[in-house]
Every structure is written in C-alpha cells, then in structure tokens.
Amino acid sequence: EPKIIAFEAEAEVTAVLDNHEAVTGTKRGELTIWSMRTGKPLRQLVTPPGGAASMSRKGVAATSAHSREVKALQVSHDGIYMVSASADATLKVWHMETEKQMHTLKGHKDEVLCCCISNDNDLIVSGSRDCSIRVWRLQNGLPVSAFNTGVDVFTVKISNDKHTVVALGDKFASRKLIMLKVVTTKVKSRTGSRATSPLSSPDMYPTHNLSF
C-alpha cells in the first residue's frame, strides 16, 4: 500500500537528500524533512529569532525557514549543500551535513522562482519575478553578477563548465529562452602582492534570446 504524506506545498518543491529522506518546501515557508520509508515528517530546517538556523525540537523556539512560500529547492551534486528560493525575495544556503543555515542571499526585488548550483559547488544561479538572473558565490554568499532579462524567470540551469547559463522566462503569455555567456575575469589583489592569487569574477552576456 502506497504511503501518503500531506503538505501544503507544490509537489515539485521537493528534493531527495539520500535513499531514506527528502525535504519539501511549503507554502508557509517551512522546509520539512520527511522519511521516504514511513512517509512521516521528521524535522524542520528553521531560522531562530537570533538569525542562526538549526533543527526545530520540542522546547526550542524557532521560526520557519522563510517568511513566505518556498518556490524552489536545489541540492548540490554531492548532497552537501542545499539552496531554497522563496517568495520572500531571498535564497538561503544550507549545509546538509549539519542542517545549519550558511547564508541568506538578498538582492532580488520580487519572488525568487528558481535556482541551481554549479557542479563544483562554486556558484549559485537564481531567477526571479523581478526579471533578473543573479549569480552568487556559494561558499561566502556574496553576489557576483546580475542580468535583467525583461521577463519573469522561472527556470535556470548552468553548464558543467560554468560558461553558459540557460533560462526560461515568461511575460504576458510570451515565453523566452535566454542563453547567457559567463565570462570570468581576473581581479588583482588590493595588496598587490605577487604571492596572492588573483580572484575570478564572473559576469554574464546574452548570446541567444528565443521567443515562442
């Protein structure tokens, strides 16, 4: 007999963590980890009032992961990190081995509808109802690039070599496929020391925009 679990959530806002557990983002902003064996909720990823995140337990005051609906989830290729995107205009980066929040990514002006993580856990790409695609560093949570597409962006992907971002957007019932070339430039250290390696700073430029 199939196991049924009820969440106030969209089915696609679910990510499989391992062979036994999955996490679902709800319309109330919760991130609920549940057992794929029993179908029962196990615990939540939350942000306590102090700002640091932890698992909710009895007797421990905590809030939901996001203040509005969770719109998308992405787990890294190695399962160590997860990114949640929300209608509260933020993304949150989670370390799934400790189930602690690492960063809150702020910069979008409207609902964040989609996100993805590069295969090497270097970059996060996000798309929003504010018509922008943004790139962030996963390890420090800093923004590195943004591009205005002119449409609501509801799907983003980054190539394995991190040279291309592909996105799908929609505005007034007209869909657009967007391809952006990611160009990495070297930024010299402020110290000017030869012993310090230059930093890389990616930026995005359009290559193809297809409307259909």
Image (cartoon, rainbow, N blue to C red):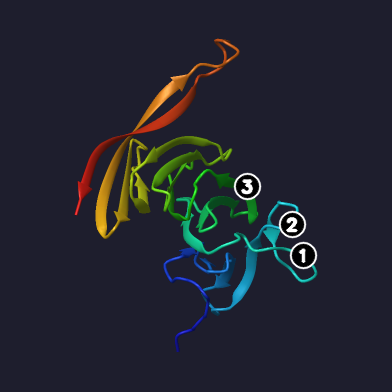
Instruction: Identify residue for label 2.
Output: 49
Give how far across and how far down residue 149 sits, in percent.
34, 44
SS at circle 1? loop
User: Do the numbered discs 1 and 2 sit on residues whose CB atoms are within 8 Å?
Assistant: yes
Task: Identify which residue, 171 or 106, lies in the foreground.
Answer: 171
**Residue type, label 3:** Met
Q: Nearer the viewer, residue 87 or 91?
A: 87
Dividing the image into 4 quarters, which one contains the C terminus?
Answer: bottom left
Q: Earlier in the sequence, mark 3 or mark 2?
A: 2
Q: Residue placed at 48% from the left, 51% from the top?
A: 76
Left or right, 208 with respect to 164, comes to left
Q: Are marks 3 and 2 in contact (CB under 8 Å)?
A: no
Question: Is label 1 or label 3 in front?
Answer: 1
Image coordinates of residue 211 in percent, x first then y, are 20, 50
The image's mark for residue 61 is: 1
Q: Which residue is mark 3?
A: 102
Residue furthest to the right in view is: 59
Q: Is residue 104 visible?
A: yes
Q: How many numbered callouts?
A: 3
Rendered image: mark on residue 10: none
